[in-house]
Image: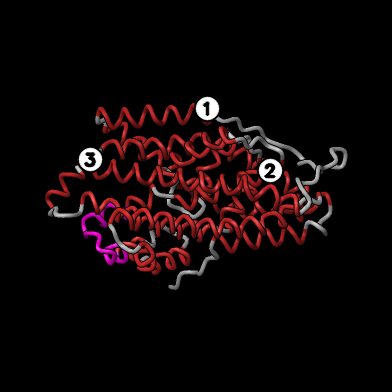
Amino acid sequence: MQKKNRIGLLPRVIIAILLGLFLGYYLPDPAVRAFLTFNSIFSQFLGFMIPLIIIGLVTPAIAGIGKGAGKLLIVTVIIAYVDTILAGGLSYGAGTWLFPSMIASTGGSMPQIDKATELVPYFTINIPAMVDVMSSLVFSFIAGLSIAHYGLRTMENLFNEFKTIIEKVIEKAIIPLLPLYIFGVFLSMTHNGQARQVLLVFSQIIIVILVLHVLILIYEFCIAGAIVKRNPFRLLWNMLPAYLTALGTSSSAATIPVTLKQTEKNNVSNEVAGFVVPLCATIHLSGSAMKITACALTICLLTGLPHDPGLFIYFILMLSIIMVAAPGVPGGAIMAALAPLSSILGFNQEEQALMIALYIAMDSFGTACNVTGDGAIALAVNKFFGKKKDKSTLSSEIS
């Protein structure tokens, strides 16, 4: 029996956006209000889930990192975290320089909706979160570090099982409904006359994001090339098959075999590559952090939300931690990022939905940037741990 070909998340999101843009001009008010009602309930559910997502993903991640805190692991995690912060910082710096003039050239901020004529849902269901986002993050750090330090196996198993539940909720409930949620957002924006301005702005912003992700790869491999004293562009060229594979699959995990092969082609030892590449497929998301920062800054500029450097530095630091724990399902990174977007930047449900749509629309390029950068990290780690070390010595560094 043949398996049915399922449409991927990206095509479904694109179809949802296009349908929302088209039908927003033609659907009557009662139909638009019906979709607004769904969006209202779904956004309440997302708000309820965000703190649970943080606890379910961050706690096991911290416990797992602390448990095997060998030198090789610590160095790899620090490099991945610092690189993710640098990517977010580069994105914010470029954005504050370029985005205001781009937004001004397309007509300025989003048009304001007349409250007297604004459509509202038929009804709403209030689903308050069990705990706020910052409390869940602090709890995750305390619990994760305690599990790692004291070797609390029962607690570790409990949080790993809770992580499985959260990942299944994201994979089976949230992700499948996202296209309908995004359709409702673009339907409402088109009906209210806001869609044109948003599309004009982001058609330019996407070009900047694509250029930035190339610049990130260049600086990553220039640093790696300087460390190993080799031509950075030759090293980057060798990683091209991994980049193209990630571009096609939008999955870091699915690209691991190709990334491993190309990393070893850059003369990284089998042992270092075999440890660093699978780990970085989970914890190194520089491309994702860059995209999220750029899109978040754009929405802040469009809607008049605060976007000062101090606020965004705090946002990038928290985002980089949460990216480490992002689930390996399509759209998992942006689902985890909803926590700092709402708690730090103050995004409402419409702004969060716009972030989700924009992120997924460019997901493959962010994944390709993440995966290719894993090869640069492996080169740097190999310089310190792969040279003149046999397998037994390397194993002692890992443990």
Give the amino acid at mark 2: Leu
User: Which of labels 2 and 3 is toward the front?
Assistant: 2
Q: Are marks 2 and 3 in contact (CB under 8 Å)?
A: no
N-terminal of the pair, mark 2 or mark 1, is 1
Look at the magenta stretch and give its main secondary structure.
helix
Residue 289 appears at what percent x and percent y?
50, 47
Circle 3 residues within 10 Å: few <14, some 14–19, many ≥20:
some
Amino acid type at mark 1? Val
Instruction: Report, in whole angstroms, how far the alpha carbon at label 2 lies from the one at label 3.
Output: 43 Å
* Residue at position x 70%, y 53% in the image: 102
Q: Which residue is mark 3?
A: 70
SS at mark 3?
Answer: loop
For this view, does 132 lie left or right of residue 77?
right
Please give the name of the residue rendered at 78% of the width and 41% of the height, measured from the top-left corner. 120
Q: Is residue 126 above or below residue 261?
A: above
**270 relative to 84, above or below:** below
Q: CA distance from mark 2 to mark 1?
A: 29 Å
Foreground disc of the pair 1, 3: 3
* Disc on the earlier residue, 1 or 3: 3
Please name the residue shown 64% across and 50% down the image: 98
In this view, the residue in front, 165 or 80, is 80
Q: Relative to 140, does residue 191 appear above or below in the rendering?
A: below
Q: Quadrant of the C terminus?
A: top left
Q: CA distance from mark 1 to mark 3?
A: 34 Å
Residue 291 location, x and y as percent? 54, 51
Residue pointed to by mark 2: 301
The residue that disc 1 covers is 131
Q: Amino acid at mark 3?
A: Gly
Q: Which residues are magenta?
A: 261-278
Q: Residue furthest bottom?
A: 2
Residue visible at 65% across and 63% down in the picture: 15
Q: Which of marks 3 and 2 precedes in the sequence?
A: 3
